[in-house]
Amino acid sequence: MLVSAKKMLRDAKAGHYAVGQFNINNLEWTKAILQTAEEMKSPVILGVSEGAGKYMCGFKTVAAMVDAMVDSLGITVPVALHLDHGTYEGSYKCIEAGFSSIMFDGSHYPIEENIAKTKELVAVCESKGLSLEAEVGAIGGEEDGVIGGGEVADPDECKRIADLGVTMLAAGIGNIHGKYPANWQGLRFDVLEKISKTVGDDMPLVLHGGTGIPADQIKRAISLGVSKINVNTECQLAFAAATRKYIEEGKDLVGKGFDPRKLLAPGVEAIKATVREKIELFGSANKA
Ligand code: 13P
């Protein structure tokens, strides 16, 4: 059964670790992440962008697949199915489709409009027992067509959104979706510290753009109140590299090496290795 992310994030905040959100693209991705979380006894959040939802034939298909897979694989760790960077309309579609957690990304709206729409969604999610993530200060880079300017969040605006009763808050602190450029200055811990103090101890903070952030910065972010870390690109890079290797070595040409179950297996193993490494780093192993 899918669960909201409320309890897992409250526990993570209190226990000074973070729960990973790993974005899914298809059945192989979903299975690899669920099996790794189960193996490591870690709670897990499956992220679905609107683009990935469309690719997988719509949010209803995704919810049905994930729900059935959790059951068929005998997954016992808490699993939340979470909309990633949802629009206002997309948020309602996912609520209807059976997602257990929603991110409404109103960071591109003027702050008053972001507040009004987030407030409305807090009430809807609350009435249905779902968790809600809000965002202040757009994350830089591009994810599935969602382009952010990379603004650093204003702590007072964070406080206003946090006080609406959201479950978790994503705040721009110099993080970027996708690969980090060579001249990246690192996370703005001065801003994170201010946000953390302003919103208070009970608000789990979310770090987007988890791909490529050095381990010491991840640990410092967790120590300053980050309780959820999103990873997408890193699994994609690992999958692509392993698949490339298999084909470049000509393994698809030997025997039945072209069988998709064989062809995709190294990529799946690479996703599992990435997820395993992140769960270790985030400290959520054996917390389920
Ligand atoms: P990366 O693709 O940089 O890992 O970011 C993922 C993310 O933040 C999803 O919202």
Image (cartoon, rainbow, N blue to C red):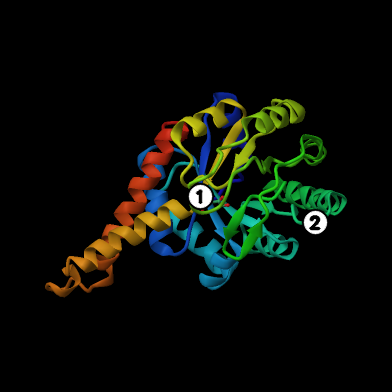
Residue for point 69% across, 40% down: 167
Q: On screen, 33 above or below 280?
A: below
Mark 1 and ligand 1: say if the CB distance to the nearest ligand atom is below 8 Å.
no
Residues packed near mark 2 inside 10 Å, few (<14), some (14 to 19) or many (20 plus) = few
Q: Residue furthest left?
A: 255
Q: Name the quadrant containing residue 157.
A: top right
**Element assignment for label 1:** loop
Mark nearer the N terminus (1 vs 2): 2
Task: Examine the rendered structure and indicate whether residue 184 appears above or below residue 198.
Answer: below
- Decide which of 183, 262 is in the foreground and name it: 183
Three-letter residue code for mark 2: Tyr
Residue located beneath label 2 in the image: 109
- Element at label 2: loop
Seen in the image, is 53 located left or right of residue 91? Answer: left
At x 42%, y 47%, the residue is 75
Total labels drawn: 2
Do we see residue 72 in this rendering? no
Query: Relative to the observer, which residue lies in front, 46 or 277?
Result: 277
Q: Is residue 102 above or below residue 161?
A: below
As drawn, the label of residue 189 is: none
User: Badge 1 is on which residue?
Assistant: 181
State whether residue 138 appears in this view: yes
Q: Amino acid at mark 1?
A: Pro
